[in-house]
Image (tube, rainbow, N blue to C red):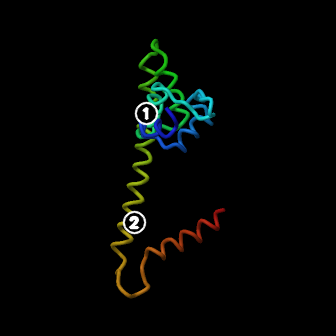
Amino acid sequence: MNIGAASNASGVSQRMIRHYEKIELIPAPLRRDSGYRDYADADVHRLQFIANARDLGFPIEDIRDLLGLWSNSQRASAEEKALAMARAEELGRKAEVLQALRHTLLELAERCHGDDRPDCPIIERMSNHANSTARNR
């Protein structure tokens, strides 16, 4: 199948398919006499695997490791679990940061009158933070 059909079947954009080929996350497909890529069902399955891993937040290097495990029928599930647990911990840290940012924004919005006056702590906070950040650079 051509790249458009592989994209439709896998749910991965043509641009990302080409990117995954370039970084060797998927093997380069065979080429037809016309020079067009010719994807097999196994390629589509691999693309779906990659898309599912991306949806779970795995970075490319972890996906590379997961693909290696997936192709190894003798693999130990301990490696899979370790990758998943490490990713879950990282996502937990990011969630805490996002929650703190959300809390700050809600607090600033609560203190803003939201009327015709220009006085509002939101812009003031960013202005003050920008000044202190510039001094620390």
Which is nearer the eye, 1 or 99? 1
In the image, farthest residue toward the top: 74
Q: Is residue 113 above or below residue 132?
A: below
The answer to whether 58 appears left or right of 113 in the picture is right
Q: Report the residue at 59% width, 35% height from top.
A: 36
The answer to whether 24 appears left or right of 67 in the picture is right
Q: Quadrant of the C terminus?
A: bottom right
Which is nearer the eye, 52 or 58? 52
The x, y position of residue 51, in whole percent, is 44, 37
Q: Three-letter amino acid code at disc 1?
A: Gln
Task: Give the quarter of the image for residue 57.
Answer: top left
Q: What number is the disc on residue 48?
A: 1
The x, y position of residue 78, in whole percent, is 43, 20
Mark 2 neighbour class, 10 Å CA radius: few under 14, some 14 to 19, many 20 or more: few
Q: Which residue is mark 2?
A: 105
Q: Is residue 97 above or below residue 92?
A: below
Q: Earlier in the sequence, mark 1 or mark 2?
A: 1
Work out how far the residue at label 1 is from the one at label 2, CA to CA, in angstroms. 37 Å
Q: Three-letter amino acid code at disc 2?
A: Leu
In the image, farthest residue toward the right: 137
